[in-house]
Image (cartoon, rainbow, N blue to C red):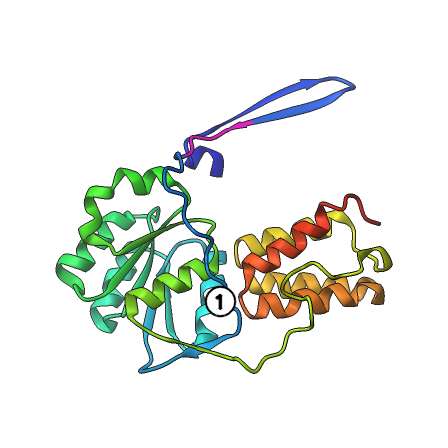
Amino acid sequence: MLVQVMGGKIGLTSELGKGSVFNVRLLLSEVTYPSAPPKSHANIRGYKGRRRSIMVADDDRTHCAIMVEILGPLGFGVTVVDSGIACLDIAREQRPDLVLLDIAMPGMSGWHVAAELRERVSPSTRIVMLSGSAFEIDAKRAATKHYDAAHIKPFYIGSLLQTIADLLDIEWIVDTDSETPDGARDGTDVALIDRRLPHLRELIDLRRLGEIGYVRGIREKLSDIASQSQDYRWLVDRLEPLSRDLDFPQYIAVLSEFIELGPHT
């Protein structure tokens, strides 16, 4: 479904006794001006000033749960709705500071909701459009007066937090006293030869969870891995601080290094 949403196609060829080959074709935008890597947002504990309110409008419950788990502990008041109509109704009452607005929702598209919010319901609310397809965003560039920023799913949580900070003009409170074990950030000094790694599929699952910023899923997966063997405790201790601090770029980089080592037992 995701491939179709992004305007692509999936092909399959299969030969009895030999196996199957899947081909995926995607229409991707050309990178004309490469952007800088997203900044790490490790050790963010909150922000200065009055409490800000954020509404998450998305019919994807998993995505909403991720946003609540990430934004709530940082001090934001988070309201979740699953349709455009509900978004407009509650926005009339709450006047949220910012709305994270999914484009594809039942009943009313995110574009129509954004126009209503900006022109009639809550003109001062900042709007961030979210979509699984870059083409949906590109096709509506003319409607930029109705929204302030856009992110393509899946996105780095650090990039979204930077957008929120820019739009709401807030300054993060960073825990500068938290200590990280030597080498835990640069990923270069772990003696992998002397340490066991879980099965390769476990590492791939952990990386996928990091790519969508699913903190709760990461926590549950790490707990499961820790219960398999005490030999994996070092890996859990390595990854837990990165996920807790929302440092997903480094979290993914560490796992990618381990995955490249090949099959594990």
The image shows residue 28 at horizontal and vertical percentages of 42, 33
What residue does disc 1 label? Answer: 41
The image shows residue 56 at horizontal and vertical percentages of 37, 62
The answer, for residue 1, to whether it is visible in the render is: no
Side of 85 relative to 40 (left or right): left
Question: Which residue type does callout 1 highlight?
Answer: His
Residue 25 on the magenta segment: yes
Most common SS among magenta residues: loop
Q: Is residue 185 above or below residue 103?
A: below
The answer, for residue 33, to whether it is visible in the render is: yes
Quarter of the view holding residue 230 = bottom right
Q: Residue at x 30, y 39 (%)?
A: 138
The image shows residue 185 at horizontal and vertical percentages of 63, 65
Quarter of the view holding residue 166 = bottom left
Query: Which one is in front, 257 or 52?
Result: 257
Q: Residue at x 77, y 43 (%)?
A: 262
Side of 242 relative to 227 (left or right): left
Residue 261 on the magenta segment: no
Q: Is residue 27 above or below residue 12?
A: below
Side of 197 relative to 244 (left or right): right
Q: Secondary structure at mark 1?
A: loop
Query: Which one is in front, 238 or 118?
Result: 238
Which residue in the rendered view is the most extreme toward the top?
Answer: 15
The boundaries of the magenta stretch are: 24-28
Query: Which one is in front, 181 or 209?
Result: 181
The image shows residue 64 at horizontal and vertical percentages of 44, 61
Which residue in the rendered view is the most extreme toward the left?
Answer: 120
Q: Is residue 43 above or below residue 12?
A: below
Side of 224 relative to 52 (left or right): right
Q: Residue at x 42, y 36 (%)?
A: 6
Q: Residues within 10 Å of mark 1 (few under 14, many from 20)?
A: many
Please count the marks in the image: 1
